[in-house]
């Protein structure tokens, strides 16, 4: 069997395995070496944030007939996309696709902050009152569908190989949990790592309730994009321990922690 065929056949198992391993590992680090002391009880938040992820996953499977990996396989069979037209060597196409998809996710992230209708949906992610591994899986189902549509269009345009898409999906999911982790990295490690990838301290600034900090550090994987496009902010002005997480207009349990409130949040202008 071709490597791409093996990956396509076992895509779900690979992604689920990577997700569970990283979720347990990061959750354990949060318990052992927390970066910030939680104010909101963890149990209720975790139940509802995980519930949002499970609901979203179920809805996607019921309503979206094709996955990103299947899209890549279809484009490959038909020779669609830039990498196929230019006959780029396979491993170079894999690396180029991962980098290009990461740039597209960065630009998409800026877009959902800039367009009011999209921000209504994306603010579900930002309205979490704490910042930990479950924040990284807390996205409204509508946002996941929109993101998947953009991703699939990018895959077809690029002609991204199946292997690239599987790797990118695993990296994106893993990094979303890593850079939302509430665990303490040694300062030297953070300085070194953020030269290449987005660290928890770097992305935490993006979850500030202060507007200028909220509109910075948009990257999920590669930290270069924020520096290149001028959206990088090194530290929050009040420090990480005093950083106020969330959105000022929505700070009640029913609005931002209870699952029905999270689902309704995009359709509300003001808090109750």
Image: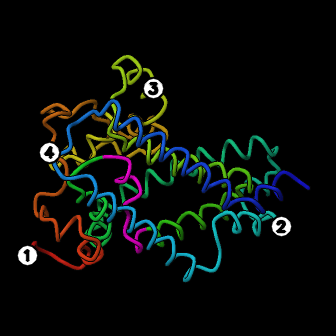
Q: Is residue 99 left or right of residue 234?
A: right
Give how far across and how far down residue 11 sits, in percent: 70, 59
Q: Which residue is mark 4?
A: 244
Residue sitting at the far bottom? 63
Q: Secondary structure at mark 4?
A: loop
Q: Is residue 149 left or right of residue 123?
A: right
Q: Name the image quarter holding the N terminus.
A: bottom right
Distance, label 3 to label 4, CA atoms, is 24 Å
Within the image, what quadrant is residue 26 found in? top left
Q: Nearer the viewer, mark 4 or mark 2?
A: 4
Residue at 51%, 44% in the rendered image: 22
Q: Is residue 197 left or right of residue 110?
A: right
Q: Nearer the viewer, mark 3 or mark 1?
A: 1
Question: Relative to residue 79, is residue 14 depicted above or below?
Answer: above
Q: Which residue is mark 2?
A: 77
Q: Which residue is mark 3?
A: 193
Distance, label 3 to label 2, CA atoms, is 38 Å
Q: Earlier in the sequence, mark 4 or mark 1?
A: 4
| Crowd band around label 3 with a 10 angstrom C-alpha radius: few (<14), some (14–19), many (20+) | some
Distance, label 2 to label 1, CA atoms, is 52 Å
Q: Earlier in the sequence, mark 3 or mark 4?
A: 3
Residue sitting at the far top? 188
Q: Nearer the viewer, mark 2 or mark 1?
A: 1
- Range covered by the magenta-colored residues: 132-143
Residue sitting at the far right? 1
| Crowd band around label 2 with a 10 angstrom C-alpha radius: few (<14), some (14–19), many (20+) | few
Q: Earlier in the sequence, mark 3 or mark 1?
A: 3
Q: Secondary structure at mark 3?
A: helix
Type of colouring:
rainbow
Residue at 26%, 52% in the rendered image: 42
Mark 4–mark 2 contact, CB under 8 Å? no
């Amino acid at each position: 069997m071709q490597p791409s065929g093996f990956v396509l056949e076992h895509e779900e198992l690979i992604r689920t395995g990577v997700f569970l391993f990283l979720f347990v590992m990061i959750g354990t680090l949060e318990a052992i070496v927390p970066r910030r002391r939680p104010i909101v009880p963890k149990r209720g938040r975790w139940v509802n944030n995980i519930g949002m992820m499970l609901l979203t996953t179920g809805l996607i499977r019921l309503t979206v007939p094709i996955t990103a990996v299947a899209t890549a396989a279809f484009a490959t069979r038909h020779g669609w996309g830039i990498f196929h037209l230019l006959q780029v060597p396979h491993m170079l196409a894999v690396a180029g696709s991962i980098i290009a998809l990461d740039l597209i996710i960065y630009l998409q992230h800026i877009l959902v902050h800039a367009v009011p209708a999209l921000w209504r949906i994306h603010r579900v992610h930002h309205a979490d009152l704490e910042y930990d591994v479950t924040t990284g899986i807390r996205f409204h189902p509508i946002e996941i569908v929109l993101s998947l549509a953009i991703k699939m269009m990018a895959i077809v345009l690029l002609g991204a190989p199946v292997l690239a898409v599987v790797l990118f999906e695993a990296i994106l999911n893993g990094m979303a949990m890593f850079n939302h982790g509430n665990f303490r990295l040694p300062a030297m490690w953070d300085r070194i790592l953020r030269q290449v990838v987005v660290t928890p301290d770097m992305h935490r600034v993006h979850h500030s309730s202060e507007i200028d900090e909220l509109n910075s550090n948009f990257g999920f994987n590669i930290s270069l994009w924020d520096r290149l496009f001028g959206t990088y902010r090194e530290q929050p002005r009040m420090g990480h321990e005093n950083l106020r997480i969330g959105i000022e207009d929505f700070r009640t349990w029913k609005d931002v922690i209870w699952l029905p409130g999270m689902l309704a949040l995009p359709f509300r202008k003001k808090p109750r």
